[in-house]
Image (cartoon, rainbow, N blue to C red):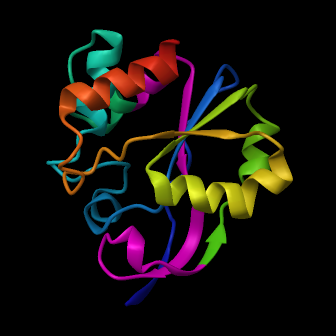
């Protein structure tokens, strides 16, 4: 178990209406200094399919996809103790200042990518923001029970519905 600090800035603009929150960047994401960087993570392919776009490859393309659709992206946690990328191992979580982001963007909906992110958001953040979250299936390859098709369907319902 190691203590990890979040160092990737949030992606958002003054037009961001939906905030998508993960839990904490994985070791691969921290190494790449951007979100959902593990090659088998299905976040970017699912998001591209929702919007009928080419799957983004570069950080610039990923940011453009988010901003083009008025999305913001960040993580619930600023720091925690964690083993590898295992959300189940998280101890001593400290939340990011999501209220500060909400003062800079007209976010009206919060989506959490996985049950741990939603649980931590509801416990640590929602009492401050009073903005409920919708839980999306985790895009992690470890979430083998959810196919890419099911992931896209859930993301489409939450993002476009």
**Coordinates of residue 61 in the picture (x, y in percent):** 32, 27
From the viewer's perspective, tell me whether residue 122 is left or right of residue 99: left
Residue 102 visible in this rendered orientation of the protein: yes
Q: Position of residue 133 (x, y in %)?
A: 64, 40
Residue occupying the far bottom of the picture: 1
Q: Measuring 54% from the left and 47% from the top, which residue is drawn there?
A: 74
> At 47% across and 54% down in the image, what residue appears?
115
Which quadrant of the figure has residue 64? top left
The residue at the point 73 percent across, 30 percent down is 105
Farthest front residue in view: 145
How many dots with numbers? 0
Magenta residues span: 63-92
Return the residue nearer the eye: 155 or 55. Answer: 155
Q: Is residue 80 above or below residue 56?
A: below
60 w.r.t. 146: above or below: above
Magenta span has 71?
Answer: yes
Question: Is residue 46 located in the magenta-colored stretch of the structure?
Answer: no
Residue, x 29% and y 68% (percent of image)? 27
- Whether residue 76 appears in this view of the structure is no
Q: Position of residue 91 (x, y in %)?
A: 52, 83
Where is residue 8 shown, x and y percent of the image?
48, 56
User: Which residue is more in the foreground, 129 or 67?
Assistant: 129
Relative placement, left or right, of 28 versus 135 is left
Q: Quadrant of the N terminus?
A: bottom left
Quarter holding residue 122: bottom right
Q: Is residue 127 above or below residue 149?
A: below
């Amino acid at each position: 178990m190691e203590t990890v600090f979040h160092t990737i800035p949030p992606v958002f603009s003054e037009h961001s209406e939906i905030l998508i929150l993960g839990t904490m960047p994985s070791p691969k994401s921290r190494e790449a200094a951007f979100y959902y960087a593990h090659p088998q993570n299905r976040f970017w392919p699912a998001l591209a399919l929702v919007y009928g776009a080419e799957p983004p490859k570069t950080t610039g393309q990923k940011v453009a996809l988010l901003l083009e659709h008025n999305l913001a992206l960040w993580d619930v946690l600023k720091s925690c103790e964690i083993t590898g990328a295992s959300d189940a191992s998280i101890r001593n979580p400290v939340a990011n200042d999501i209220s500060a982001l909400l003062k800079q963007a007209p976010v009206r909906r919060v989506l959490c990518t996985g049950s741990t992110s939603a649980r931590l958001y509801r416990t640590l953040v929602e009492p401050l923001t009073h903005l409920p979250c919708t839980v999306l299936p985790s895009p992690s390859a470890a979430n083998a029970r959810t196919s890419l098709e099911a992931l896209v369907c859930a993301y489409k319902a939450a993002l476009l519905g």
